[in-house]
Structure formats: structure tokens, C-alpha cells
Image (spheres, coloured by chain):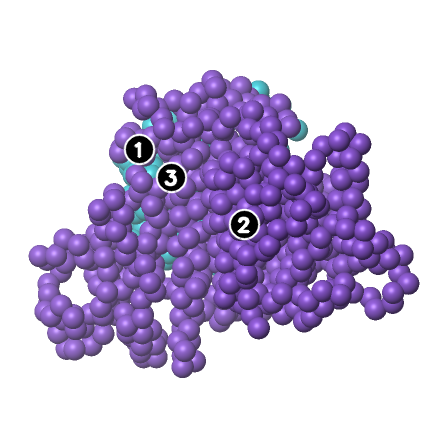
Amino acid sequence: MAQRPLDEALEFAENPEPRCPCVLVLDVSGSMKGDRIAQLNEGMHFFWEEVSQDPLACKRVEVAVVTFSDTVDIAQDFATIENSQAPTLYAGGATAMGTAILKALQLIRTRKETYRRNGISYYRPWIFLITDGEPTEPPEVMQRAAQEIQQEEAKKGVAFFAVGVEDANMDMLATLSKERPPLKLKGLAFRELFLWLSTSMQRVSSSKVGEKVDLPPPEGWCSV
Amino acid sequence: MRYNSLRHGPLTLGKKINEGGEGEIYEVSGDPDKVAKIYHPNRLKDIEGEEKEKKLRYMVAHPPPNCEEFIRGRSHYNLTWPLDILLNERGQFCGFLMPKIRGSYPILHLFTLKEREKIYEKTGIQFSYKFLLRVASNLSQVVANLHAANYVIGDINEQNILFNKDALVTILDVDSFQVTAPNGAFWPCPVGKYEYTHPNILKELLASGKSYRDIRRFPAHDVFGMAVIIFRLLMEGWHPFQGVLPTEPARIEEMIEKGIFVYAKAIKSAHQVTPPPASPDYSHIYPDLGRLFNRTFLKGYEDIHKTPSAKLFEIALSYYERSLTQCNANPNHFYYQRPNQESACPFCKYKKRFRKDLFPPHKRVNSSSDRKHPPASSLSSNPSGPLLRIYLVFDLYMAPNNILEEINESISSFFQLLYNDRQVKSQLQISIEGIGGKSITFRELSFITEPIPPLILNTDYQPDLLSSLHATVQRAVNTSREDIRFSRPFYRPWILLYFSSEAVSLPSSLSDEKKIRIQEALQKNWITIMSFRLYESKMEEFFGKKVVAIKPKALRKSFEWLFEVIKMRLSESDPKKPVKLPSMGPWRAT
């Protein structure tokens, strides 16, 4: 169990809405340099803008950003859209993908415990991985990451989405989640991708009982 | 594109204001007071379109009273009721006209300090708990009026209820209401939001895979959603079914389905659940309103007939508003001060705990006309003559909401009469009780120190009339004995019984000990018993005296008569001398 900060409850005193958590796990390795990272940053800013327009979703959707290159960093811990800004990322280095996924799962576990202590209910957390390469870590790390994702998926603890950019190793990504095959980004259509994510999050965060949320089709950003 | 309104003729639409799943909202060129909703063509296909057209035509022809009211010289819309249907160029139904609402905001912006501050920055509206209470009571009034007109809202949520700077409420999305025509035509409400959905409906949705449009809603279902909104207004946005469980937090709809209202004592221990640590102290809620929450969130879960009506919420909220005390430390803190308890402003307490003032002092100090309630003790006047003690005893076994409404409204005006009369205030003590399996005290025997009665609610226990009455008689006799001991002059106490249920009767066996005691008190003139019957009661005679039948809707008049009787009695200062009673008016059924 993680430590508990003083005045943790204040955050929820300000906003008792149920939360819709999402971790963006983003590849910032050397190969993402240039246009790719620029488009990704722009897409993320657009995402924040879009969700901010929705008075309820901006209080419910919480995003954490985990980046990976040589190291894994938490570019941003969980915060609601209304209380945060899109981070700006820089690329360079190797691809510690498995460690990043494990970090994302850990963030979610900690966050869930915080929700529990504070009586906040939540929607199924999402992990949204975006990468253009393949892991440069020992294979056991990826195996463990895949195993944990599958366990969580099985008990509906998270929903895992993987998006491959240009020369990403799609076969490797396919081993991560049995539930959802990875999607291939069309060119650098990050803006369209984040518009889709924003619409999906708004739908999920106001979804109704017994209703299977119909996610919008990934048209416009996904190449089949 | 040109459209045609049956009442207003051809018209063109201006710019698009809003877009939803069902259609789009447009301005109407040349008419700033109306907007048009145009459905997506795929929503008007076949039978769905035909039904929608029929429903809208019916609604246009049958608006409930008070859709539009004139308040402070300005028109206010309680509902965006359809004004007329719209046809396209080919003469096909495509949407409807409705009033345009200005200067109003979704109620969700009242839930938390942070949201209220945003509205303040935008509009300058300064908030207090009073404001929130008024929004709550206005909301319950609009809902009560709709129910009286046989409409059910169905999809109550935090985004389709608006408030304005005067705390007036407007309900949107009127075309999704559930409509039942007198000829049997029925149009369901096809949508809903689970956080405001009654547990019985949730069960149906989950168990059978039905959707909202397959379910017939009742006013009690609306009251559930409305009560959640009111709870969130008064509890800083916290949902009544949101709490800390030992396990992973459940989704709100699961908590509702299981009936885990986390602020109820019984629920707390049964489910090992506690209210969220950041929620305000629930004990600040006016007790009568708390009882309505219990009946809605717990009892209504067992049986929707136990859910109070919107009207009862309106009554309880008006008592709440009138019972507010102003805080000494911050004149913008208004709260209910429990009698005989140390003064403790819940908002100062909250401020100490979270270092946030939920209702900061108003920026421009307005010379508030709010009178602080003087402490009750200074009002309990010196008796200027003998004391008259009246015990009002109600049999309300399973009484339906309409009877409860009539009783509460009648008692409310009765208390106003009593409060406005000096002599009555100084010489009359009144107690209000209910007959149940155990007797229920709505109000302890005391002087009228404020014009606010308790909320009278029904009982679920099979009533034991004899035991309850016996207990009341005993108390009355004992109080008189005290008076004798201290040589205080007093009139013979009155016990007034109001029978409403068929289920209540006296056991016929005369040998019953309690019955004998009551008879003795009557024979020795220790007490006077007057009995009345309303609604379904068949009680003809009670302890050898005729039971007076009260006509439907005439209870209030009977209390006006009772007030005259009290005045007459007090006008004769010698308790021994009998007085002539004023004749009973046309409220009496023959």
C-alpha cells in the first residue's frame, strides 16, 4: 500500500464526481523525435481542450501520463482535466515499454485505493499505449507486463488499448492484450486519434447502467 | 430551409445553438423568445417518428398549468414546454418550438464551491445555503405541479435542470417526459441517467436487459431522482449512495440497487460503510428533511408507495428555510440550530476542517433583512392565564401522500394562526403525536414559539390505538397532577383524535385495563376527547361520542374552527366555567 498524503480528502471535497481514469503510456524514445513527437504533443493539447468543453467530463476524466525511453517517467500523475494541462514531451533514448506498462498498472492500483478511501466510485480505468518501436528491455519485462494486463483485463480491472505508429512492431503489440488487438495509426493522425479518445472518454464518463458503451469507430486515424 | 408552425405560420431558423443525440437546437429568425428543436431525420423514421409526432401534438395541446409564470414582473418558464410542432417544406413533422431560456445554468454548477465560484465570476451571483434551499424547494414545487397534471419527468439529472439568479428553476428536455393521455395513449420516457434512477428500475434494466423506454415510470421514481439532486445540493455535491466500503468502491448504480444509502444508521452497520471523509457532516440537515430522505432512499426501496411526494419535500424544505439561524461569525452562514443543543454552525465547522468557506461573506455587504431567530427561551412567554394543553393525535397508518399533504398543509396554516395570536401563544401548549405500533411524537408538548410545525408522516406499523391513546391520556393526566401540585391554573386538557385508516379500531372487550383507565379519566372530567375521521376511516363512535366526519379537502377549515374553539375557551378565564362551542362549518360531512 502506498503512503497517504495529508489532506488527501481536500481534492475530493472540491469534486465528488465519480472518476474515469485513463493512463496514457507514451513512447518518447529516439525514434519519436521530430514530427512524431510534435504531432503527439499537439494531439494531447487538443484532447485537453476537447474534454474541457464538457462540463461533466472535465470533472470526471482523470489522466495520468507515463512516458518511456531509457527510463520510465511519470510526466503527470492522475488529475482531472479541469485541474491539469497537457504536458509537453521531448523524445530521445531507448524504449523501456514493459516497465512503463507496469508503472501504469501500479499508478492505477494506487489511484483505486485512494478512490476507495475517499468514497469515490469510478469507471473501468483505461491504459492507452502509443509506441513506434519495440521494447529494448529484457523479454521477461514485457512478458510480465503482458501477463498483468491479461489478468486485469480478465477481471475487468482495466481496458488496455495499444496504438502503433508507423514502423511499430504490431506483432509484439498483439501479444499484450487478447481482448483488444492493437490499432495502427494512419500516418501521424494524432489529432484524430485524440479526438476519438476525447469522444470515447466523454461517452464512458456519462455512460448509463447496463449500457455497453458504444465507442465511436476509429475512423480517420486507424489504418486497417 | 423554411419551416411551418401551425400557430405561427412560416418561419426560418437562425444559428445553431446546441446539438444532441436526438437533434439540434436553433434560434428562430425574428423571434428572440423562441428556439426550435429539429430532430435528426433518422430519429423520425417509421413508427418512432409517428409516435413522436403524436406525443408532441398531445403535449402542445395539453400544457400543465404554470408552465410560464410572471415573477417580479418578468416572465419565467418552469418548463420548456413545446409551444407548437414544426413541419418541414414537404409538410412532414420535423421538430417543435419552445421558449428560449436566458440567464440560467445547469444545477450541477451549484453542487460544489468550486463550481459556484465559477458562476460567481461569470455572473456575480452570490450564493448562500439559503439560495440552495430555495432552488431545492422551487424544484420540488415544479415537480409536484407536473405530477398533479399527470406527467412524469423520467430523466431527471444534473444537466437538464437549470437555475437562475433568483433561484428559479427550469426543467429542460420536456419532449422526453412520460406522457399518459386520458384516452389511454401512452408515450414512455426513453432515457435516464443511472445515478438518478430508482432501484426498482435499475433492477429491471439489469435483470432483463430492458431499456428505459420499456419501463413505465411513476411519480415516486421522479421523486427518487429529485431527492438525489436535492441531497447533492445540500451536501456539497456528494451523492447519497457514495461511500467508503471495505472492498473496492462499487459503482453508484450498484450501491443504489443494493439500497446502500450510506448516511442511514442501519445501513452503516449492516454494510460496514461510512460516508466519504470529505463530505459535510450530515447531521446539519433539518431532521424532517432527513426523514424524507430515509423514506425515499430506504423505505421507497422496499415499496415505492412509501416514497413521499414532491409536495411533501416542498413543505419540509419550506420549514427548513424558515427555521434557519444566521451565524454570528459569518452572516452568510445559515443553518438549522437543533433545539437544546450547543450552537454550532456546520459551515464554520467545515471551514475549520477543510480551510474552505463554502459560503464566504457576500462581497457587498447587503443590509440583510433576515431576522435572526431569537433563542427559544426568550419567546416562551409568561402565562397570562390558565394553560390549555392540546394533544393532536393522528392515525396515519399507511396514509397515502395526498392525505399527508392535506394534513401538513392544514397544520401549517393552523400554526400560522396560533403563532399570530398573542393570547394563544402565552396560554396554549400543543403536542402532536401519531398512532403506530409504538406511539410517535412529532412534537413534544410545548408553547408555539415559531410558526413552523413538524412534518407529519405516515406509519408502517399496524397501529395499536388503545395503547397509544392510553399513553397520551396518562401523560395528560400526569401533567395536570403536576399543575395541581404547583397550584398552576389549567383548563381541562383536550385530546383530539384524527382517524384516517380503515385498519384502526378499538377492541370491543370492555374489560381491557387500558380501556377502563381511559373511561375513568373521561368520567372524572380529567380530559376531553374529541374525535374526527377523514379519508377511509369507518370509525362512527368513540367512547360513546359520535366521531365527526370531515369532508375531503376540508381539514384546513376544520382547523380554523378549532382555532375559534381555542379562542373561545381562553376567553373565559375560569377553567371551571363551560363555554359554548362555535358551530361546525360546512367542512363537516353529514
User: Mark 1 vs mark 3: same chain?
Assistant: yes
Front of the two marks 2 and 3:
2
Q: Residue type at mark 1: give it.
A: Ile
Q: Is residue A49 above or below residue B334?
A: below
The subunit letter for the residue under badge 3 reads B
Q: Earlier in the sequence, mark 1 or mark 3?
A: 3
- Subunit bearing disc 2: B
Q: Nearer the viewer, residue B436 or B55?
A: B436
CA separation in Å, label 1 and label 2: 43 Å
Q: Chain of mark 1?
A: B
> Residue at (80%, 46%) from the top-left corner?
B474
Chain letter of the cyan region: A
Secondary structure beneath disc 1?
A: loop
Label 2 Cα crowd, 10 Å radius (few <14 / some 14-19 / many 20+) = some
Q: Quadrant of the C terminus of chain B?
A: bottom right
Q: Considering the image in quadrants, where does the N terminus of chain B appear?
A: bottom left
Disc 2 element: helix
* Secondary-structure class at tag 3: helix
Q: Are marks 2 and 3 in contact (CB under 8 Å)?
A: no
**Residue B184: x %, y % from top left:** 43, 80
Label 2: which residue?
B563
Residue pictured at 42% horizontal, 35% vertical? B130
For disc 3, the neighbor class at 10 Å (few under 14, some 14 to 19, many from 20) is: many
**Which quadrant of the view contains residue B384?**
top right
Please give the residue where the numbered disc 1 appears in the rendered image. Answer: B125
